Amino acid sequence: MQDLTIKASIPELIAKRGMALDKIDRAINDLKDALLLANDACIGGKQNASSSLVDAIRDQVRFGRVEYDAEKIRIALDRSMWCSFVVNTPLWSLMDTKARKQFDQDMAGIPPEATEENLRATMSLYFADAGKIFQRSLIETFRSLPNEYASNNAFKLDKKIILGHIQDKMGYFSQYADDRIRDLDRVFWVLDGKEYPADYNAGLPGVLRDAVCRARGNFTAGAGTCETDYFSVRFFKNGNAHATFKRPDLVLKANRMIAEHYGETLPGDTGRSEPEPTRDDLDDNYFPTPDAVIEQMLDEAEIEDDMHILEPSAGDGRIIRAVKSRWPDIDVRGYEIDPKRAHNAGVRCFDFMQVFPEPNYDRVIMNPPFSHGRWYKHVLHAYKLLKPGGRLVAIVPNGAINKKYQEEWKVMMRRFVNEIPLPKGTFKDSGTMIETKILVMVK
């Protein structure tokens, strides 16, 4: 007969049961208190900390085993704290969609420990840089609008913009358009001194989405109008919408920030609409690039459709036109100091050397002015405007570099890719017999 003897005494088992229930009860109550404290440690009073901690705890209590990892718990709580310090403060409304997504990606990694020293230092830095954060997000929002949609001028908003592809053929509002419209709307809220609402149904995107929904037919796109404090919008069955600005004062503010970013001066701010030429700019020094050389340069540039291209000294625009002929939809920006040539090229009349060197471009294709050492000054300045991994293709003469710039040139040439000597007389028809070459570098 099977031995049914219980090796432990019944009173001992009952005692352990009671102790287990007591410890679980205390642990659950302690956990409740811990989650409340975690929420209190995050700005905004939301449940982000609780959900993150619960997920982390759940991962450590499985299949009857407890494998406690204090670092995983720390990461979950600190990630929630860092997010709350940005998301639930005015900083979040200053950031565009791209910046927010980048922040989310950064937080997906291992955050620094949320100590008083780290939090104070980081947030002080963020708030001290708040103006620049907003300016960068404004520029990113502005750059996301195709040139023809922004205005007739490549560096300023005008009276209205065209918002492309806000609805599909069946009349459904575009999720992609939602982010673009939200960023544009957010700019005007912030310029007006208001914090942009977190509610996705607020502001221009919500109003426009509702209007598009009401105008939608039987699985077909509709047309209609809607308004907010900042925009008057007409949308059409082809999917586009015309947004007219209702606050010229805020448009002026935005344009001043755009102008500041690009090193521009708005007419009326200083009394000048064009830069004052330096001594070196008084000689013409204009030698158009032959078509055959341009084709060589474009081959070396290795351009792709979604890139941002810069032509620093555009002349009459022949390099830009060649780029657009190969890649019709690509984003190409240019500068030219001569007003007549700038007009013919369709670029900004401005001294490229006065442009703030922010790395915004994937490719730079250039034929700089040669006299007085301007060619290496222009190339060095253009190199600073390249994104990491970007590529610069330049026409340069076979000349010496001033001692003052030799070290900077050497540093840049560490990323040298190719050098193509051009035949003598290449620029003869352009007005010079100077010997030149194509120089290719990456960053």
Image (cartoon, rainbow, N blue to C red):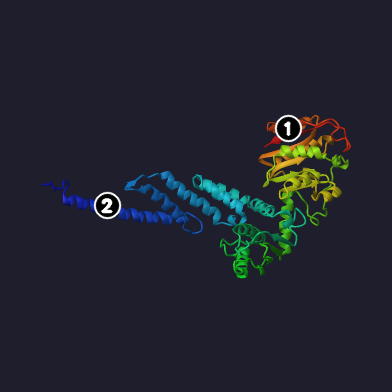
Q: Is 43 in front, or is 111?
A: 111
Judge by depth and name the residue closer to the eye, 133 or 57: 57
Q: Where residue 359 sits in the image (x, y, percent)?
A: 68, 43
Q: Is residue 254 left or right of residue 369?
A: left
Mark 1, secondary structure of its residue? helix
Q: Secondary structure at mark 2?
A: helix
The reply to whether residue 381 is visible in this rendering is no
**Image side of residue 63 versus residue 106, left or right:** left
Position of 2 compared to 254: left or right? left
Q: CA distance from mark 1 to mark 2?
A: 73 Å
Along the viewing direction, whichever of 33 and 430 lies nearer the viewer: 430
**Residue type beneath disc 1:** Trp
Q: Quadrant of the C terminus?
A: top right
Q: Is residue 293 visible?
A: yes
Task: Tell me the kind of residue under disc 2.
Answer: Ala
Q: Within 10 Å of the Cα at label 2, are there few (<14), some (14-19), or many (20+) other Cα atoms?
A: few
Q: Residue furthest left?
A: 1
User: Disc 2 marks which residue?
Assistant: 20
- Could you say where residue 343 lies in the image, as x and y percent from the top left? 83, 51
Q: Which residue is mark 1?
A: 409
Determine the residue positioned at 42% across, 49% down.
56
Q: Nearer the viewer, mark 1 or mark 2?
A: 1
Q: Up-down: is 375 above or below 346?
A: above
Q: Position of residue 426 (x, y in %)?
A: 84, 34
Above or below for 58 versus 208: above
Q: Determine whether, in the image, residue 30 is placed left or right of residue 412.
A: left
How packed mark 1 is, by other alpha carbons closer than 10 Å (few <14, some 14-19, many 20 or more), is some
- Residue at horizontal 56 percent and vertical 56 percent from the top: 89
Q: Are marks 1 and 2 in contact (CB under 8 Å)?
A: no
**Residue at the image position 49 percent from the left and 55 percent from the top:** 42
- Residue 90 picture quarter: bottom right
Image quarter of residue 292: top right
